[in-house]
Image (tube, grey):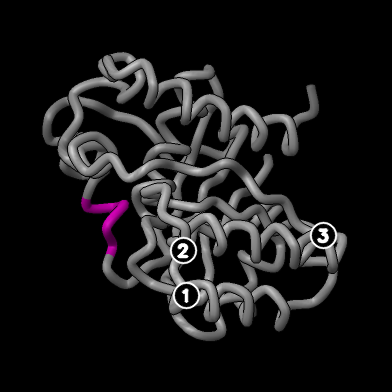
Amino acid sequence: MKTIAITGDKGGVGKSTISALLSQWFEHQNYKVSVLDADPNRTIYTWIEKCRDKGYEFCAAEKNADLLIIDTAGTSGSSLIRYVREADLIIVPFQPHIADLEIVVGWFLSINESLQKKAVFIPNRKEGTNEQREGILQISQIIKTQDRGVLLSGFANRPTIYPTILNALTQNYFSILKDVKTKEEINSNFSILKELLYGK
């Protein structure tokens, strides 16, 4: 079983939303997915329970799962937690603003080389401003300098689309998602994660 941990030292950057998207995307790709909610806010478990109340069962904790997705808290020292250290990929969502970047870069430079190699940065809520473009370039340059980590293209700011995944679903999110641009955006990012985990 492969493991993805969604983490970082900055809260409020969309970790739970990306965890939910990942669980739905991989399930839609016919993978058996389990989810562990390690965030005290319990956002993911609450979401799963809401879906179950609507009759949609998914992400059961089964021993034969292909993929375990772990949603962690955005707190200092999260890189030291065992399930982050042992993950196959460490997903680090961030908003490309100066305040966020200082925390994300500091976190990345504080972890050891073996963890840096597994880090995958996902810019979230992009709005195309000069500040954000410069922020994404900064992360790209640090990854290049360290020669470790991966930077994905990330997600645009779509407040009427992405947050709705945390509503109660009655079926897989990607079975009902109509927006073509959103589908393409998600596929372009998550297909890379799939390749990193399982190969081509």
Determine which residue is flagged by label 3.
144
- The secondary structure type at the circle numbered 2 is helix
Give, as a single range, the part of the protein colored magenta. Answer: 42-46
Residue 129: % across, % down: 41, 54
The residue that label 2 is drawn on is: 131
Q: Where 97 sits versus 2, above or below? A: below
**Image marks 1 and 2: residues in contact by CB distance under 8 Å:** yes
Q: Residue at x 84, y 67 (%)?
A: 146
The secondary element bearing badge 1 is classed as: helix
Circle 1 or circle 2, nearest the eye: 2
Residue at horizontal 25 percent and vertical 20 percent from the top: 171
Q: Amino acid at mark 3?
A: Lys
For disc 1, the neighbor class at 10 Å (few under 14, some 14 to 19, many from 20) is few
Q: Position of residue 110 (x, y in %)?
A: 71, 83
Tag 3 or tag 2, which sits nearer the N-term?
2
Q: Nearer the viewer, residue 112 or 98?
A: 98
User: Residue 43 in magenta?
Assistant: yes
Q: Position of residue 145 (x, y in %)?
A: 84, 67
Q: Amino acid at mark 2?
A: Glu
Task: Identify the disc placed on residue 98.
Answer: 1
24, above or below 38, in the image: above
Nearest the eye: 79 or 106: 106
**Nearer-N-terminus badge (3/1):** 1
